[in-house]
Image (cartoon, coloured by chain):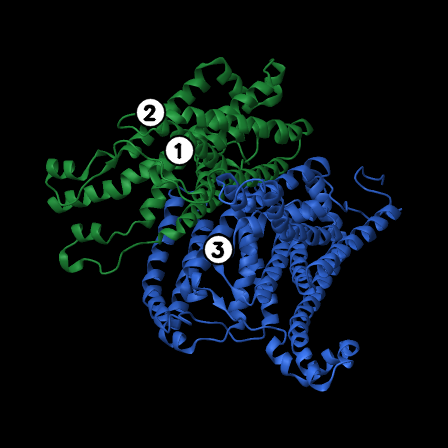
Amino acid sequence: MSQRPHEIARGNYYLRVIVVFTLMAGLLALVGFMQSWSLALTIVNLCLISAVMALGVNIQWGFAGLFNVGIMGFAALGGLAVLLVAMPPVKEAWAAGGIRVIFALIIFTAAIALTLHTHKRLKGKRGHGLALSAILIVGIIISRFVLDPGVAAIEAVNPSSTGYLGGLGLPVVFAWLVGGALAAGVAWLIGKITLGLRADYLAIATLGISEILVAVMRNEDWLTRGVKNVTNLPRPVPYEIELQQAPWFIDLVARWNADSLGLLGESARASALQPLLIEGSTIFVKLCYAGLFLVVLLVIYQLAELALNSPWGRMVRAIRDNEVAADAMGKDVTGRHLQIFVLGSAVVGIAGAMLVTLDSQFTPGSYNPLRYTFLIWVMVIVGGSGNNLGAIIGGFLVWFIWVEAEPIGFWFISLLTSGMGDDNGLRKHLLDSAQYMRVIIMGSVLLLVMRFSPWGILPEQTKQFK
Amino acid sequence: MTDVLNALVLFANFIFVPALTYGSQLALGALGVTMIYSVLRFSNFAQGETMAFGTVITILGTWGLQALGVNLGFLPTALLALPLGIAVTAGLLLLTDKYVYRYYRTQRSASITFVMASLGVMFIMNGLIRLILGPGDQNFTDGERFVLSASAFKEWSGLDEVLVIRTTQALTVILAIILVALLFWFLQKTKTGKAMRAYADNENLALLSGINPDRIVMITWIITAAFATTAGVLYGLDKGYKPLAYFHLLLPIFAAVIVGGIGRPIGAIAGGFIIAFSEVILTYAYKKFLAYLLPSDLAPDGLVQLLSTEYKLAISFIILVVVLLIKPTGLFKGKVI
């Protein structure tokens, strides 16, 4: 097989990987030295999550050319899983309306199943659409009739602190798997309907489902507390306060700073230790998170690489590059697409769950397509679609720019307009709108990379078989 | 008898008139999407933001005219500023075509590449409209508020319920009819319109018969700008300018296009009304309506609302899914597999 135009020689490629990752580490270290190590670690944690999300999108777009415009919805599903798995159940709420809610959900599911069944039975007959709509509407009416009193009862239980059903009270890391499973389930439904039709339909359907999922999470208070948010989600890592009192941690910090502390007397030593303990505990917590996220990232990366280089991966890429030819070779195009779509969405769901765990709060109001769909796309395109390492470096780099662009943009505009007075209308307007510049810049980056460097920083590499 | 009349008036006031207005706005927006689809062969995700951009420019023009003391009497001043909005929007769309889409056209890229590029354009416009006019709501409606006011209707009919028609609602429907009629005349009767249909139908054959593709593409963008801006301004006059609302119009518009059959102007119009009527009918609270029609001891306690208005988008989505399941080509047999 001859080399494709976008591929670079093997040796150059490895050199490029090393250079790019070293530069990225250097940038993060620079933040550590110039701003603070705590901030640098915050950025690293979000970079790791972004990289996982970008891997998920790369599986869909890079491997198979599937265009998912609803990444936000799948990430939000992952976040919802954290709440449903890790929060303790609210017993009063379950007693007040739990049975009604479960019963209503069963009726609703039955209505949908009946609709699908009728669809199969009546396919191609007259009045088909009308019958389906009628069943669906009657189903919704009955389930609402059962649901509404239950919801009212649940939301009346201590509304200022709970007013929802709560979760299962299981360990939070387990929620990451559940988040992936939830996202995969929804992806399967969407994929079943739209894959096999024109590619645009998948884009439109994913856009729609993601907006609806977020709308549900914002409005169904009995499930998510809606815009009242769920805070204080359980953490998989120790709390700072506990660390500061744990003898082993105090000992560790003391030993770490032995050089500077050793010169001080007994009383001065205790007072100097306190701020070190506080700083040390936040850094320790962030390091714990970074370790967990890194493990997830490496596992998913390894699996994605194995899949990409397996016969299955080659088939998927063949389908991407020429659907008609692959179909003629007897490959099940729609089936492979469905697999890929479900797998990629599951990875996005896991990343979404990790993000909510890191924030330890679930805020349905904070999901917007710019941050959760579009930014991830820019990461994949900039990093190099089809290359897993590319997706990872894209996730790191684009998140880094996204975070650092605001202070730099703000500084830049205030420098430009420093000649004007503080109450100058134009200066005020420009400073207020610095955040919209970010959107414009990211949009431009996407268009420019697509146009002039469509293979990204690390182009796709395929193993050569002689 | 009066109860039935009251119920009918209630229906007209809260369902028929609003749905007709909203449907006209959707139809205009959907026509833009369907035109781009038939000629350039991709789903334009930037349509919602294009509508918002046209509205932003029109609002600025309106404020300029108001500052000069110009107005249109009982009609909103925005109508005078509308040509400016269309012209600037057409300019912007032609720029995006020149610097973004043309390259992929010469490369004969897959349609998904166009869709992605349109997503990039969408986000640039998204930032642009907020940069120009800020993220807040704006109200730019002036002139006479009602064509048919509550007191006038009450005096005429003597019923408890009233039918109110706002100027913006009447204007929306009339303007939509005029624009659609113009579009159909253009497509059916003029030489350029026929060339455009030929190009949409079979690109290679059209090129062979000497049709200039660049001209066709240019005119398509200009028509899209006109429809998108008009739809956006009418929506803004009717419901107030909210930047996020325009983004959320994207799904109903796509649903309308697909329900009617992609690439079919008549389908886009029918689809717009189907989506609008379903949305309004399914989210309306029927408590009062049923209270008029049913005997008093059967009158409902709850709101009798099928879906809360927060789930408007879900209705477009469900219709979209049902159409994709049953008849992916849409009502009017669009050309898509």
- Secondary element at tag 1: helix
Horizontal arrangement in the rendering, residue A195 relative to residue B261 (left or right): right
Q: Which mark is residue B70?
A: 2
Q: Nearer the viewer, residue B139 or B217?
A: B139
Distance (Cα) linking label 2 and label 3: 46 Å
- The chain that appears green in the image is B
Instruction: Kindly identify which chain the residue marked by label 2 belongs to.
Output: B
Q: Position of residue A52 (x, y in %)?
A: 67, 58
The amino acid on which the numbered mark 3 sits, given as a three-letter code, is Leu
Give the Cα separation between the discs numbered 2 and 1.
18 Å
Q: Nearer the viewer, residue A217 or B326?
A: A217
Q: Position of residue A9 (x, y in %)?
A: 87, 44
Which kind of residue does numbered mark 2 sit on? Answer: Val
Q: Where does label 3 land, which residue? A: A213
Q: Residues within 10 Å of mark 2 (few under 14, many from 20)?
A: few
Dots 3 and 1 on the same chain: no
Of badges 2 and 1, the one in the foreground is: 2
Residue tagged 1: B233
The quadrant where residue A138 appears: bottom left
